[in-house]
Amino acid sequence: MMNTRSIRKHVAVGAVAVMSIGALSACSGGDDSGDGTTELTFWHNGTADPLLGIWQDAVDEYEAENPDISIEVVPIQNEDFATKIPLALSSDNPPDIYFNQGGGLLATQAQSGQVADITDLTKDWIDGFGPAAANWQVDGAQYGIPYAMHVVGYWYRTDLFAQAGITAVPTTMEELDEAVDKLKAAGIPPIAVGGKDRWPDAFYYNAFALRECGEDVLKKGLADADLSDDCFTKAGQDVIDFIATEPFQDGFNGTPAQQGAGSSAGLVANGEVAMELQGTWDKSVMQGLTDTDLDPLLGWFPFPAIDGGEGDPSATVGGGDGFSCTQEHVEECVDFLHFLSSDDIQKKLVEASVATIPVNEAAAESITDPVVKSIYDFNTDAAYVQVYFDIALPTGVGSALNDAVANLFNGEGTATSVAEAVEAAR
């Protein structure tokens, strides 16, 4: 593990230009105390263990090694970032370090002028992140650092699948439909979805579009915010048809995704529903919502193939979690983010299943859970990983897409409604 002191010395060389920008800014996340201590504010989305504890331990360790730095840790519920960050970036007091997921979302945030361009401060070590860092770039400039990558697939309870007589994970939509029927027959709600938060609904539209559309059509449609190709209409109809099979738990439109034992994650964690289409971070969320050891009870499989679809069945929807810096304390922020990417911190994220796909290759070697290893290998072998549509698109357009998909889950709209909502919002 790289010593944090050496990291700060390392990044200081390129900091002059950026710090001059910070000195001109009237904005401040943390305060300088007057005793030589720089105080930073750190907004993250780890409101429960294990992530809550990992970030707090990291901050404690960093402060111990850097006594001139004090970090105020502010855990915030994941879904609240969509409203809190835009407000913070339009204020005089944004956080110094904050959670984000890159893509079009970050590009929209960068337009505020509050997000720091950290290209010069990271250029000597960012290559170690490989292609993962690209999603935190805007027009070729680095505006953030990922700490973990994710893909979307089905987490399922192996004990409930066995109880329903399901002997192999579904690889096609026909097989998924058969599994849903078997679970219903066994009296087990098949699939949990946190419709209250809307973005989990959108995973279905994302996944169906990925299977219906060829890669070039899909990427062009998202780049242009133009989903008028017939394959996107097929995806909309696929969502409607799948909902009609009634695979979800009772009250799914009012169920939160990750908050409490009654959330979609909590329902699977406590054996009340058999599976959930979610990001690979979900295992750590589920473990925080039950006292049962989930290691021997959880399995994972990718979204099934669609007969006749033009998409590569090995492609997947995914993205990453990371952090960005605002202008006031750029050098200190980047140094802390470099610390978070160190071998030790990354291995802790892997061991807690927070990072199934770490950005640090050394940490990948510490994966011992066979299910997590299968996810890591799936990502490695994937034809491509398409960033979640709402993150890839500009913020307002992505929100319109999520709302339109949520309306389909409410029984409102048609196969073209999502494309029409995107067209209206762009």
Image: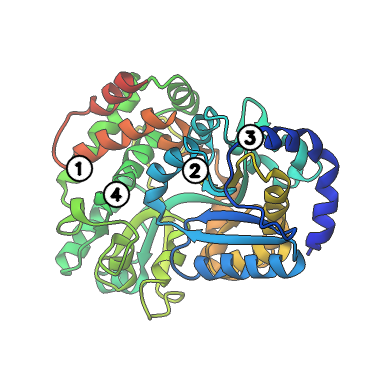
Quarter where residue 131 is shown = top right
Out of 114 and 316, give the one closest to the viewer.
114
What kind of element bears circle 1?
helix
Q: Which mark is residue 197?
A: 4
Q: CA distance from mark 3 to mark 1?
A: 45 Å
Q: CA distance from mark 2 to mark 3?
A: 46 Å
The answer to whether mark 4 and mark 3 are in CB contact below 8 A is no
Q: Tell me if 300 is positioned left or right of 368 in this view.
A: left
Pick whichever of labels 4 and 3 is earlier in the sequence: 3
Q: Amino acid at mark 2?
A: Ser
Residue 324 x/y as whole percent: 59, 44
Residue with the mark numbered 2: 314
Q: Which mark is residue 409?
A: 1
What kind of element bears circle 3?
loop
Residue 208 x/y as whole percent: 34, 38
Pick whichever of labels 4 and 1 is earlier in the sequence: 4
Q: CA distance from mark 4 to mark 1?
A: 12 Å
What is the count of numbered marks? 4
Residue with the mark numbered 3: 25
Q: Amino acid at mark 1?
A: Phe
Front of the two marks 3 and 1: 3
Q: Which mark is residue 259?
A: none
Front of the two marks 4 and 3: 3
Out of 267 and 179, give the one closest to the viewer.
267
Q: Tell me if 369 is positioned left or right of 239 in this view.
A: right
